[in-house]
Image: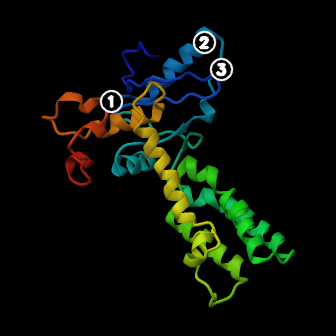
Amino acid sequence: MANSQKIQGFSIPVNMYADNTTIYLSKKDRYLDLEDILKDWCLASGAKFNLEKTEILPIGSKTHQEQVVQQRKLHPQDEAWNDLVHIAKDEHATSWEPILEKIESNLKRWNMCHPSLDGKHLITQMIMGGMTQFMTKAQGMPKSIEAAITKKIRTFIWNNRKSPPISLASLERPVSEGGLGLLNICARNEAIDITWVQAFMNLSESRPSWAFVTDILINSLKPCNTKGHSNFNTLLTSWEPPTRGPRAN
């Protein structure tokens, strides 16, 4: 596939895995060409590529992503994908619903024990913090979910009181400052976001593959007269990606 003249894709340093494969197509590539290459590879190797489980992840501008979802095709000359091809949409809030339900059921069970305020602090850290950390790291937490979990924390701590005697902001302060050290879900999420920035700024050989993809996407928006090391890492440049206008679309 790397030597194919039909697929342009992106040049990205990657580590190869046996179970799952991610293929990046440029705007000049056609999905049908990719299918033909994969079918030839399966025929020659005797392996089986599960095209039925293929998931399309639109990247690029918001306009392009919406166009791919609506038209169900990547290239204007391609035929629309059938209903068996899954196209990932903005389903962040929907994917959080099972976790919110699990949190709610666990809190009801713990409430039957009538825990103290210190006990509720530990339960909040274990339930709200522990059950949301992985998905927040993997795909981020929408603001609506952030607000919902914060409300659940307030309700759990004060047993549905309409006027809590102490604000969450006071309880979230360290014990040395008179607080309880209660979980601040917004601050926790910001800390997780910083770990992504830290990984993106890693310029060593251990830099993750997704960071190179991010460089390519950002560099595709650079001004035409930009030279030097701008293609190496966007942090070494003085220009900023456009947020509006023709280049942003």
Viewed as shown, does residue 36 lie left or right of 178?
left
Residue 20 figure quarter: top right
Q: Which mark is residue 43?
A: 2
Q: Callout 3, which amino acid?
A: Lys
**Helix, strand or loop for disc 3:** loop
Residue 43 appears at what percent x and percent y? 60, 12
Going from N to C along the chain, the mark reached first, 2 or 1, is: 1
Tell which tag, 2 or 1, sits nearer the viewer: 1
* Residue 180 visible in rendering: yes
Quote the CA–CA distance across marks 3 and 2: 8 Å
Please give the name of the residue rendered at 30% of the width and 29% of the height, measured from the top-left corner. Answer: 232
Q: Which mark is residue 28?
A: 1
Viewed as shown, does residue 28 lie left or right of 17?
left
**Helix, strand or loop for disc 2:** helix
Residue 229 figure quarter: top left
Label 3 environment density (alpha carbons within 10 Å; few <14, some 14–19, many ≥20): few
Please give the name of the residue rendered at 36% of the width and 31% of the height, measured from the top-left corner. Answer: 26
Q: Callout 2, which amino acid?
A: Leu
Image height of 163 relative to 92, above or below: below
